Amino acid sequence: MTSEATSEPTSVTVLGLGAMGRALARTLRAAGHPTTVWNRTAGRAGELVEAGAVEADDPEKAIDASTITIVCVLDHAAVAEVLDAADAALAGATIVDLTSSTPEQARALAAQATERGARYLSGAIMVTTPMVGDVDAQFLYSGDRVVFDQHVATLRVLGGATEFVGEDPGAAAIFDLALLDVFFNGMAAFLHAAAVLRADGVSASDFVPYAQRVLDVLAPTFAELADNVDRGAHPGAEDNLDMELAALEHIVATSEARGIDSSVARVPRDLARAAVDRGHGRDNFSRVVDVLRTPS
Ligand SMILES: NC(=O)c1ccc[n+]([C@@H]2O[C@H](COP(=O)([O-])OP(=O)(O)OC[C@H]3O[C@@H](n4cnc5c(N)ncnc54)[C@H](OP(=O)(O)O)[C@@H]3O)[C@@H](O)[C@H]2O)c1
C-alpha cells in the first residue's frame, strides 16, 4: 500500500459507478492513481477498465485493494447496505463517503464504520459531474481529521476547492444542505422572475446580465446578513423592512396579475410581513431570521 508521504499516487477504490462515481473514478485514474471500482450492477465499468482501472467482484475485495475507499452511491440506505456487504474488510480500512445525506445519517454511518474498525471521513460534492477535477470544484469534508490531512493531496485531485469543515461527521452534510438551500432558492427565484418577464415580452436570456449584476450585490450582502445574525443586531439605518415590504408586495401583485404562481415571491414577502407585524419594520432584512427561528 502507498501513502502520500511517498511519491507514488495513493491507490483508491470507488464503490458506486453512477454518473458521479464514474466521474470520480475517471478523474482519479486520469491523475495516475491505481483505481479499483465496484458497482452493484455489473457492466458499468467498461470505459474505466479501458482507462486502466481494475473492476472488483464484490465490495469487500474492492476495499481490500486500495489505501482509501470512496463510496458514492444513491443515498444513506445504499451506503449502509454496501458497508454491510463489505463487513469483513472494514477493520483497518479508510472510508471516504461522498454520498449525499442528512447530518444525522452521516453521523450514523460514521458510527457504523468506526465501530467496525474503519476510519471514516464524510464528504459533500458541491459540483456537477463535468466539473469534477476542476481547480475551483468545491468538495467539503468532515469527521476524521487525520484521514483528511493524510489524504488531502489525493482528495484535491477531485476538486481544487477541497476543505475540512469540522470533526463532526455531520458537518459536511449540514454545509451541503445549507449550500443547496441557497442554490435551489436562487434558481427558483430566477425562474419566477423569468416567467414574469416573459409574460411582458422580455426573454429570459436578455435578463441574464441584469440578474448577474444582482449576484454582485448579493455576495457582500451575505456577509452583512451573517454579521447581523451572529451579533443578534439588525440595524436598519440604510435599508429597512417597511420599505422592503412595499417592494415585495409589488413583486407578488405583478406576478399574480399575470396569472403566474407567486409562491416563490410570497415566501420573502410573508417573512418580511411577519417581522413587520412583530414590530421590526425599522430593522434590517436580517431580522427575518428571528421569524424563521420562532415561527408563530
Ligand atoms: N450527479 C451529480 O451531479 C451529483 C452532484 C453532487 C452530488 N451527487 C451525489 O452523488 C451520489 C451518487 O449520485 P449519482 O449521480 O452517481 O447517482 P446515480 O447515477 O443515480 O447512481 C446511483 C448509484 O448508486 C448505486 N446504488 C443505488 N442503490 C444501491 C444499493 N442499495 N446498493 C449499492 N449500490 C446502490 C447504483 O448502483 P446500480 O448501478 O446497481 O443501480 C449507482 O451506482 C448521490 O448521493 C448524489 O446526491 C451527485
Image: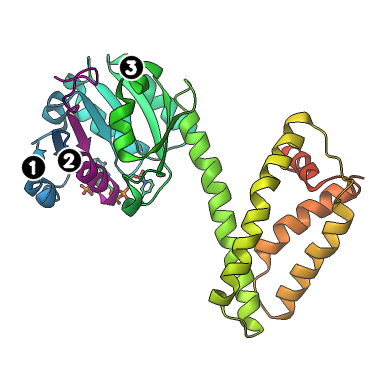
Name above or below for residue 145 compared with residue 294: above
Residue located beneath label 3 in the image: 114
Specify start and end residues of the magenta stretch as a single range: 1-28
Residue located beneath label 1 in the image: 52
Question: Secondary structure beneath disc 2?
Answer: helix
Mark 3 crowd level (few <14, some 14–19, many ≥20, 10 Å Cα): some
Between disc 2 and disc 3, the foreground one is: 2
Image x and y of residue 246, in percent: 85, 63
**Cβ atoms at labels 1 and 3 below 8 Å apart:** no
What residue do we see at 64% from left, 48% from top? 219
Q: Amino acid at mark 2?
A: Arg
Q: Which mark is residue 29?
A: 2
The answer to which of marks 2 and 1 sits earlier in the sequence is 2
Q: Residue furthest front?
A: 7
Between disc 1 and disc 3, the foreground one is: 1
Q: Amino acid at mark 3?
A: Thr
- Report the side of 16 relative to 209 (left or right): left
Image x and y of residue 29, in percent: 17, 40
**Cβ atoms at labels 2 and 1 below 8 Å apart:** yes
For marks 2 and 3, give the CA distance.
28 Å
Question: Secondary structure beneath disc 1?
Answer: loop
**On-image quarter of the N terminus:** top left
